[in-house]
Amino acid sequence: MPNSFASIENSLSNRSSVSLARASLFKFLGLLAGVFVLASGSLVYLANDLDHTEQVESAFYTKKAVQSLEKSVRATVKDYAFWGETYKYLHVQVDPDWAYVRQNLGPSLYPDFGFRGVFVVSDDNRTVYSVVEGKLSSVAAADWLKQSIAPILEKAREGEQAETPITAFIDIAGVPALVAAAAITPGTDPTVEADARPASVLIFVDFLDSAKLQVMGQDFGVDGLHVGTPEERDATYFLPLGENGAAGSLRWSPSRPGLRLLGVGLPLIGIAALLVCLMTWAILRRTTASALALDASYTSLHRSQDALAISEARFRDVVEAISDWVWEIDAQGRFTYLSDRFDDVTGLSRIAWIGAPIDDLLGTEPGSLTQWLSIPNRRQDISLQCRYIDSAGRERITRISARNMSDTGFRGTATDVTEEVEARRRIEFLSQHDALTGLPNRTRLQEFLDGKLKALPTPEQPLVMLCLDLDRFKPVNDLLGHAAGDLVLNEVSSCLAECVRHGDLVARVGGDEFVLILTDVSSQDEVEALCRRLIESVERPIEIDQQQVFVSASIGIAMAPNDACEAAELLRYADIALYEAKSAGRNTWRFYAGDMNTRIIERRRLENDLRFAIKDGQLRLHFQPRYRIADGRMVGAEALVRWQHPERGLIPPDTFIPIAEESGLILSLSNWVINTACDCASRWPQNLFVSVNLSPTEFKRGDLVERIQKALVDSAIDPARVELEVTESVMLEDATGALELMRTLKRLGVRIAMDDFGTGYSSLSYLRAFPFDGLKIDRSFLSRLDQSEDDRAIIQAIVGLGRALALTVTAEGIETAEQLSLLKTVSCDEGQGYFLSRPLDSDAFDALAGVGEIQKA
Ligand code: C2E
Ligand code: CA
Ligand code: CA
């Protein structure tokens, strides 16, 4: 089995998808919460860090501010202490006037530097000069500072040599103060000489009160610099003043950027979290719903997985059981799969064909199979008929149906339809062809004709239609049987087919009727030449059971566009022309002419009338006497039929006998003639015979003997007084049958005469072979008798022949005395003609017959 039929993945969880969906959602939610916590944590951390940095920075700047203060106070105390004037006026002697009044070291120090206390402590540690808050005072430094100043003094004096002032922070009633002290020295003043006493010490005291701290804070960018209260003792960020913070500590309120960040960030995170919660809730609701649906589909998927397994098995069974073979090709059109049946059906090797292009195996009429497969939006329910050569080298036909396999190729089945197609082809052929001759039939003719007429033939390039009908075919069938008839038709068919060109059509449209369609004949001469060829070809004797059969053909011709442009009309006109050809004596052709139609209509009308005439007693029988030439005695009479038409009057037999023959009315007509003739003759004198004309068509009908017999019996006439006149065409068509029939007729006792001798191809051998009692020389010989010596010789020869064969020779159409006397000289037996007597009606003949003799001229 190919991979593509493999079962679907088994990775589907057994859990319900609702819980699955929920679980994954909660996981996701947990993850989100984690993200939020992390974000918040980071924010807090960042805020703390920011705050911490700010604090550290503030601490740094606070320290800087304090150091800066110390430095400036130290510089100030240094300027005043290491100066000769100060040494002179506040150490050597204490001159408040110089110091305070003249403001060298007096009230201005408070407003200018903020020194709230200015003290000079003498070598014996007494406070000798005090200025408090800019005012001269008498308070002792230690008292004002509320603590011992001995360490300050000691350190200040230690810096005497190096002229280094000292600073220290002390706590004065809860307020930190910066104390700067320096030993008073003459400085660089060379006029003042240092004495040996311990140095006096100048002390400046600067209170770090809130006003001072605020100014310091502002200078260094530290907000809210202040002295820390006892409550703030645990604070992390502070600057201790003095040793271990003995003088208190400085605190500040730095801006808290972290806090601000938290103030903005946390609510944002909170809102985001809230939104996520809301969304999650919504998603959860949806997910639950779709998961429920999914659950349902999972369930059905499980079911369909089972079904898939079953259907796979079913597919496998079917693929191997059906007569079709299954194929798959890749995108390049190469076989990737062929079912086992391939080998059985095609006889080819499946293994050998895998990997080979499908186009190499299967061919189609329009383009290649792969082209067909890749037609965009190709309807997948339509199959394509393809051909291939099987292992035995035979062409097979298979119907391919195919489905697209999403871009990877195609898959489909191949159904062998060779037999079906052949059967259909055979049926199609049979439906369009004549089973006997294999020629196209009327259906095919119609199709062909429609097609050719659609191409609009022109007078220069006309479409020629020939309607060909076999003459003398029916007797072949009647006398020799259908097998012989079939043989003749087959022979004639191949003759006709040989005469036309490729692209023309020969169709058999009836028993012995054929239609030929010619498109490559342009002139009338050409058509006539073809007709001649056709007739000659058909006339060639056909050998059946060692005897020769002769048929001939009559042809009617109609042409498009001259005669008609419609198939039906063309056929009708060709048929009319055929009728004309037959009327013109058969074995010939006629082109359709406009007046033929009216003639045909006329004929049809006559045919209808004739049908009625026979029953209605409109037929009359005239009798033309026949005389013995030697003595002029009447020997008998020829019965000649007439039609007393109520409107047209008396119609001669030449007009309606052919119609009767064509329409089959000849039998009933002839019956009437035979019966009437026998009936009339039976009342004649016994020495007179009656002669009756037989149509060639009825001569060959099976029941002629019975009909004659019946007439003889009914009229009770002596058969020897009845003569039957037949033409030689009877023998031409079917000599054997004619001979047999004539022998049978002879057994009835009737005489048989050959009528119209000399008009056809009559062979004298017939006369010898057939049991004739007499022959009638055609009147055409008589009419030429006067002018031609040859004809006289011929008549003499015929009379001689007749005598030799013991036949009664009768001359017809004697119109003159000369003719009669000539016949007399050649010893012709009997004669008939207007000169002797015109045909007479029954009454007239009876009157004549009563006389029995006529006077010779
Ligand atoms: P047919 O058998 O040769 O008959 C003789 C025809 O010659 C008759 O014409 C007759 O009137 C005509 N005829 C006789 N003497 C002369 C003459 O001196 N000069 C000329 N020009 N004609 C003469 P009809 O009666 O018109 O018959 C014509 C043909 O019709 C007959 O030719 C015959 O073949 C056929 N026919 C007549 N009656 C019957 C019939 O009852 N049955 C059949 N099957 N055919 C008949
Ligand atoms: Ca006759
Ligand atoms: Ca005749």
Image: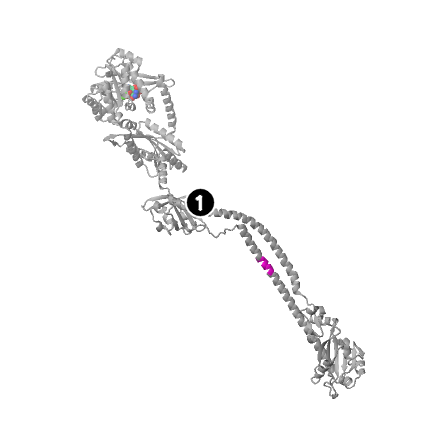
Q: Quadrant of residue 506?
A: top left
Q: Quadrant of residue 38?
A: bottom right
Q: Count of labels shown?
A: 1
Residue 495, given in percent of the width and then of the height, sits at 29, 35
Magenta stretch mostly in which secondary structure?
A: helix
Q: Secondary structure at mark 1?
A: loop
Judge by depth and name the residue closer to the eye, 327 or 813: 327
Quadrant position of residue 647: top left
Magenta residues span: 31-37
Q: Is residue 725 left or right of residue 45?
A: left
Q: Position of residue 485 (x, y in %)?
A: 29, 30
Dot 1: within a 10 Å radius of its alpha carbon, few (fewer than 14), some, or many (20 or more) residues? Answer: few
Q: Nearer the viewer, residue 249 or 113?
A: 249
Residue 32 is a magenta residue: yes
Q: What residue sits right under mark 1 in the picture? A: 380
Asked if residue 63 is positioned above or below residue 588 in the image, the reply reads below
